[in-house]
Amino acid sequence: MAKVILEHVNKSYTGDKGRRVHAVEDACLTIEDREFMVFVGPSGCGKSTTLRMIAGLESISGGSISIDGKIINDIAPKDRDIAMVFQNYALYPHMTVYDNMAFGLQLRSYPRKEIQTRVQEAAQILGLSKEMLARRPKALSGGQRQRVALGRAIVRKPKVFLFDEPLSNLDAKMRVQMRTEISKLHQRLTATMIYVTHDQVEAMTMGDRICLMKDGRIQQVAEPLEIYNNPANMYVAAFIGSPPMNFFAGTLQPRGGKLWFIEKTAGEGKDGFALQVDDAHAAKLADRLDQTLHLGLRPEDILDHAPGAEAPPGQLLRATVELIEEMGAETMFHLKTAAHGFIARLAATPFGGAVPVHPHGGFSATPMEFLARMDRAHFFENADTAAFLRDNGSLDHEKWQAACRKII
Ligand SMILES: Nc1ncnc2c1ncn2[C@@H]1O[C@H](COP(=O)(O)OP(=O)(O)O)[C@@H](O)[C@H]1O
Ligand SMILES: [Mg+2]
């Protein structure tokens, strides 16, 4: 059993010129026994600091962390029954792979036979051959070294595994391979694992749940698809998904008994697009007429529309093409409306192949027609961070989160 609970955990540092740096603020989180929890967020958001407090490598400024009901704030790292794997493998260069894996157990005075059994088990799980166990780290590839670092953690049979961006030093292909290996390892070892990454694809593919952080604050904790389909705010919506969700500022207006989203444009006389809000969303938005808010549409929720074909009412979106990227399995259309740039993720050959990818003399200024899947639309409060900072002096997180909250 290993259930990890963070209650109101804070960490502050004294930074340059005695300024307080609040690296982690009021983190509350329960990581269930055997769960694979991923901490994700941009560089500097407090992921490593949180992980290091769980490991005992950083003191906790406020709040408490417990494992299986026992508060560990003041327990020495070596007594926490935790193993950590870092980005830089931190292997001992003068020791063989075997000794690198055995060392931690030797320090803890495990019997020789037990050490041998555990190292061999770990080597087998990780596909490290007998011959490889006799090598020094410098005679291994990056992927193999990372496997040894994993092995060193596995032999300890800890209650909790902590990973801090363990794949960042590997090339793209090796990263994908190791990603699946760590996921399989989790299934096999049925241990609690906490994994830090800045890569939203790793978070989506590996996590049982994702804890998304920004500026030392937890923004949302949820299963991957829940976070993708139902992001708590605009920041989360923009962080998860590649290409990211498209956002359009606009207002809601009644027309012909229905609710419409009217794109906001800067210039007088510049026509913004109008999209009909579908009935399921409209009920929750009816009291927001004339307020500025943001419509969010994922790139895959914008479809191509063959010229002349009949369009469902209120879903037609006209935009000019700025760039086309052919990915093989799909095609990214970079588009522009009167006021917003956005991306549509279309099939390999959209519009029946009628659109030239590299037109002589640039793309046509005549708008093309797309369909917006309004049944899959998201609506967010209107947070303009720049304006928000101007009005409030500094960024108050609760206010900011409320200002870009998802409405529906
Ligand atoms: N020892 C330290 N002294 C002062 N500031 C620190 C220290 N360690 C981390 N920080 C600051 O705390 C914040 C969070 O850092 P970190 O947890 O390493 O972020 P992440 O792992 O998400 O990239 C950053 O602003 C960083 O500069
Ligand atoms: Mg980090």
Image: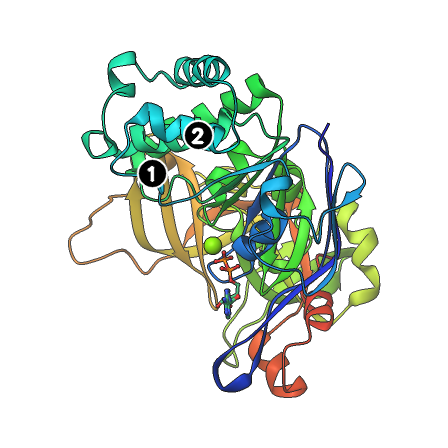
* For residue 195, above or below residue 134: below
Within 10 Å of disc 1 (Cα), the crowding (few <14, some 14-19, many 20+) is some
Give x and y (percent) for residue 164.
48, 45
- Residue 39 seen by the camera: yes
Seen in the image, is 87 located left or right of residue 67? left
Seen in the image, is 406 located left or right of residue 126? right
In the picture, residue 149 is in which quadrant?
top left
What residue is pinned by disc 2?
152
Residue displayed at 35% across by 39% down: 331
Check residue 100 in the rendering and tell me which mark sits there, or answer none. Answer: none
Measured Cα–Cα span from mark 1 to mark 2: 9 Å
Q: As rendered, which of 92 and 261 lies closer to the eye?
A: 92
Which color scheme is applied? rainbow
Give x and y (percent) for residue 208.
63, 32
Residue displayed at 52% across by 53% down: 48
Q: Secondary structure at mark 1?
A: loop
Residue displayed at 28% across by 56% down: 364
